[in-house]
Image (tube, grey):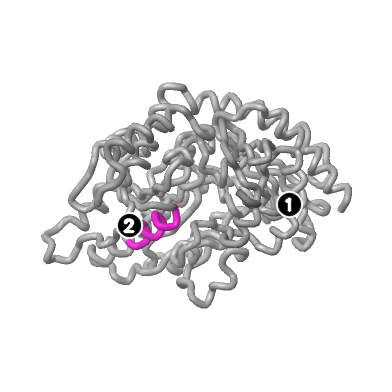
Amino acid sequence: MGNWAEKDLKYIWHPCSQMKDYEELPPIVIDHAKGLYLYDIEGNRYADVVSSWWCNLLGHCNPRINKAVKTQIDKLEHVIFANFTHKPVITLCEKLAKILPEGLCKFNFTDNGSSAIEAAMKASFQYHYQTGNPQKKRFMALTDAYHGETIGALSVGGVDLYSEIYKPILLDIIRIQGPDCFRCPYGKCRDNCECECFEHAEKMFEQFGDETSAILVEPLLQGSAGMKIYPPLYLKKLRKLCDEYKVHLIADEIATGYGRTGKMFACNHAEITPDFMCLSKGLTGGYMPMAVFVTTQKIYDAFYADYNENKAFMHSHTYSGNPLAAAAAVEVLNIFEDENILKKANEKAVYFNKIIKDKFLTLKNVGEVRSIGLINAIELVKHDKVPFDSKLRIGYQIYKKALKNGVLLRPLGNVIYFNPPLIIDDMDFVTDVAFKCTKEILHNN
């Protein structure tokens, strides 16, 4: 069969990678997976504590989801979603509508998170245009935000690593200085503040609110920024401010939804309903590409008219509402309900958070350990709150070391993190490996 890694490198340009790195660390060819673990063709095992880019929710090759997809594929693999529908996607919407924040009731399907973000942005603009506010054509977003890689989604993102080179072709976004609880300029911490940093949002709304269609936020957790966590109060204040200026609140729950933060949706912590909520990743348990924005009856009604009035939302994707993905998504919700997944995950989180803090806070180069739900992030610093020089690639060094010891981490710069499937076991093993590798790399730098 030949060398599979060599064949890979002959043909494949991997995402989010400097391909020259693959000269030193060739692609690992995965043969099969089960639960927390991936197994390569050489028989090596890796604990997937980053959920294969945060999407694997209930473990690899979950037998119940496997069965649901196998059953569906013999009935209907795909059908055009304009004027046609099917039972799995209807069932999915019916089940989601019961657990989403109150008022979210209309579902528009796409096939990936970036597309859901862009669809929500387009729908927001068109709503304002069709309801007498055509001047509302700009978007707001926070610093250090991440909302995807397509042009519109990348525009509202604020992580230069992904967007800097593309700035000449990006949308003109109104950027709000976001919360930074680790390096709070007000001398506060996330557990005892009144979100004094919200003054930046208030100033930008006062200046640009009348021309703004929507603001996009990752509720409570800015993932690609290094798992930066901020208080629910910020969301409460933002919801009120959006209402005052008639600006839509788009909650990007692609990474935070489905129990990742300890509640089914991060917005639940703040007890708010956004105007749009975008979901993907855990939606299908990490099985199939699917995404959706969910919105309110009020927004939906602004598009409801005779065809010749040109008010329809003319946005589509070939694989919108795919039956195989919908079948997987329905079974994910069934498993949540039948097996008390959220309750069990929160019980695991107490222990997981404790052993991570007990280990990592003994290292002098750990600036902060922050956690929400089963997500834990360890920010490594040179001293005090001064970051390591990015050229040292401390996180990447830890990643390589951990791989050799059977744990898949994928650090965000100088932040190593755990974002495991909600069914994680072997918590002592993965934290021991991560700790020992981190300690060794820090000692050598």
Amino acid carrying label 2: it is His
Question: What residue is pinned by disc 1?
Answer: 395
Vertical placement of residue 285 versus 383, above or below: above
Instruction: Report whether 421 appears left or right of 18.
Output: left
Label 1: how many residues lie within 10 Å, few (<14), some (14-19) or many (20+)?
many
Instruction: Report whether 189 appears left or right of 130.
Output: right
- The residue depicted at 32 percent of the width and 35 percent of the height is 72
Out of 84 and 19, give the one closest to the viewer: 19
Amino acid carrying label 1: it is Gly
- The residue depicted at 43 percent of the width and 32 percent of the height is 66
Judged by depth in the image, the label closer to the viewer, 1 or 2, is: 2
Is 152 magenta? The answer is: no
Is 115 magenta? The answer is: yes
For label 1, the SS is helix
Instruction: Report whether 126 appears left or right of 365.
Output: left
Question: What residue is pinned by disc 2?
Answer: 317
Looking at the picture, how far across and down is residue 11, in whole percent? 57, 61
Looking at the picture, how far across and down is residue 166, in whole percent? 54, 72
Label 2: how many residues lie within 10 Å, few (<14), some (14-19) or many (20+)?
few
Looking at the picture, how far across and down is residue 276, in whole percent? 36, 51
Question: Total of numbered circles in the picture?
Answer: 2
The disc label shown at residue 428, or none: none
Out of 417 and 20, give the one closest to the viewer: 20
Report how far apart the C-alphas of labels 1 and 2 lie in the structure.
Answer: 37 Å
- Asked whether the beta carbons under mark 1 and mark 2 sit within 8 Å of each other, the answer is no
- The residue depicted at 51 percent of the width and 43 percent of the height is 55
State the extent of the magenta-drawn residues as a range: 113-122
Looking at the picture, how far across and down is residue 431, in whole percent? 72, 34
For label 2, the SS is loop
